[in-house]
Image: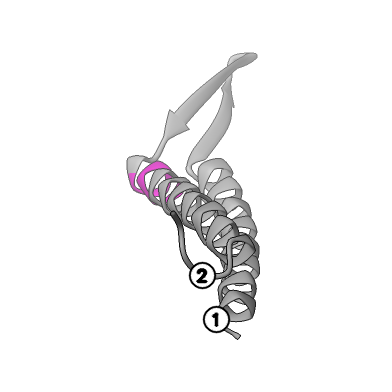
């Protein structure tokens, strides 16, 4: 029973990480503003959106690492060693 719960939790964490990756992509591109001046493209970056994207990607990475750990625990029956 414990290994099944660990496996379900790992799947939930992977799905959450994918949602966070999509959120990060959206925040990253929302933080870039391109304007044209005299035929030259100028880019302006808003740091708060890029900070949110960086935080979302960091959290997604942590969730993926924990999902891998829980998948290993679920496979071993809930205990290591």
Name the element at disc 2.
loop
Q: In the rendered structure, which segment of residues is drawn in magenta?
A: 48-53
Task: Establish if 66 lies above or below 78.
Answer: above
Q: Which residue is mark 2?
A: 78
Name the residue at 47% across, 65% down. 79
Residues tagged 2 and 1 counted as in contact (Cβ below 8 A): yes
**Furthest-bottom residue in this view:** 1
- Disc sitting over residue 2 in the figure: 1
Task: Establish if 78 lies above or below 24.
Answer: below
Name the element at disc 1.
helix
Lower position in the chain sequence, tag 2 or tag 1: 1
User: Residue 52 lies in magenta, yes or no?
Assistant: yes
Q: Position of residue 76 (x, y in %)?
A: 58, 61
Task: Establish if 77 lies above or below 68.
Answer: below
Q: Position of residue 39 (x, y in %)?
A: 64, 14
Q: Position of residue 35 (x, y in %)?
A: 56, 30
Please rate how many residues cluster around mark 1, counting C-alpha atoms within 10 Å: few if below 14, some from 14 to 19, many from 20: few
Name the residue at 39% across, 40% down. 46
């Amino acid at each position: 029973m414990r290994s099944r719960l660990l496996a379900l939790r790992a799947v939930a964490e992977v799905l959450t990480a994918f949602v966070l990756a999509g959120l990060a992509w959206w925040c990253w591109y929302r933080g870039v503003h391109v304007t044209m001046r005299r035929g030259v493209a100028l880019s302006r970056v808003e740091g708060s959106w890029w900070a949110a994207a960086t935080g979302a990607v960091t959290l997604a990475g942590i969730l993926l690492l924990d999902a891998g750990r829980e998948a290993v625990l679920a496979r071993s029956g809930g205990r290591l060693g």
